[in-house]
Amino acid sequence: MRICRILFHPNSEIDVMFSEETEQKFRHLLSLYPRKRSALIPMLLIAQREQGYIRNETIDYVAGLVELSPSEVESILSFYTMLRRDPVGKYHIYVCTNLACMLRGSDRIESTIKRKLGVDFGKVTEDGLFSAVEFECLGSCTTAPCVTVNNEFYENLDVKKTEEIIDELRRRG
């Protein structure tokens, strides 16, 4: 990554750290939609993929690109849980807590994850490897309880399987 001044940005005084590849994706997205604001969520997801989370500078930058105010972008961020305002671990875990998962033991999965990671939900482990949060529904009710790790599903979990998943991810580093 490098810091680059983007000439097509409406406010050329803003310097933002994005790769040239990301800048090209931004330009491409802006060319796809008749209304620039339609590119907002895809652009935020791309920025998050590169930076790990959505920074204040990113909000200002992307708001300018899609011709919205930063507060309008903030309102979108507050609605979509897949858009993060805080750093997460290399392995970010969503634990489903909806009724189907709760009835099949998601509370045991939650406590196992907290115990194995040594941090509460919403925190990042000291080594930066893990973070976890509760999630209302991952849409996998027939295979409850489930979690996702970086959007990969792990289903039909029990305490032993959950421990094995975390141990394997920790070995990968």
Image (cartoon, helix red, strand yellow):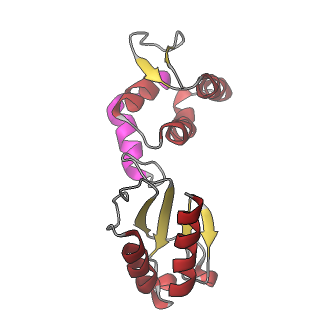
Residue 158 visible from this viewpoint: no
Residue 41 in the image, given as x and y percentages of width and height: 53, 40
Left or right, 32 with respect to 118, comes to right
Kindly tell me whether residue 42 is visible in this rendering: yes
Residue 158 lies in what quarter of the image? bottom right
86 relative to 145, above or below: above
Task: Choose between 139 and 169: the one closer to the eye.
Answer: 169
Specify the quadrant that holds the N terminus: top right
Q: Position of residue 61 (x, y in %)?
A: 43, 24
Percent x, y for residue 3? 47, 19
In the displayed structure, 61 sits above or below 167; it is: above
Q: Is residue 128 magenta?
A: no
Counting from the top left corner in percent of width and height, residue 85 is at 37, 45
Q: Is residue 103 left or right of residue 46?
A: left
How many tags in the picture? 0
Q: Which residues are magenta?
A: 65-79
**Going 36% across and 47% down the picture, which residue do you hit?**
86
Q: Quadrant of the C terminus?
A: bottom right
**Residue plotted at (46% across, 81% down):** 109
Q: For the view shown, which residue lies furthest in the front direction?
A: 171
Majority SS type along the magenta span: helix
Q: Quadrant of residue 152?
A: bottom right
Instruction: Look at the picture and state if 119 lies above or below 10.
Output: below
Residue at x 52%, y 71% (from the top left corner): 166
Q: Quadrant of residue 60?
A: top left
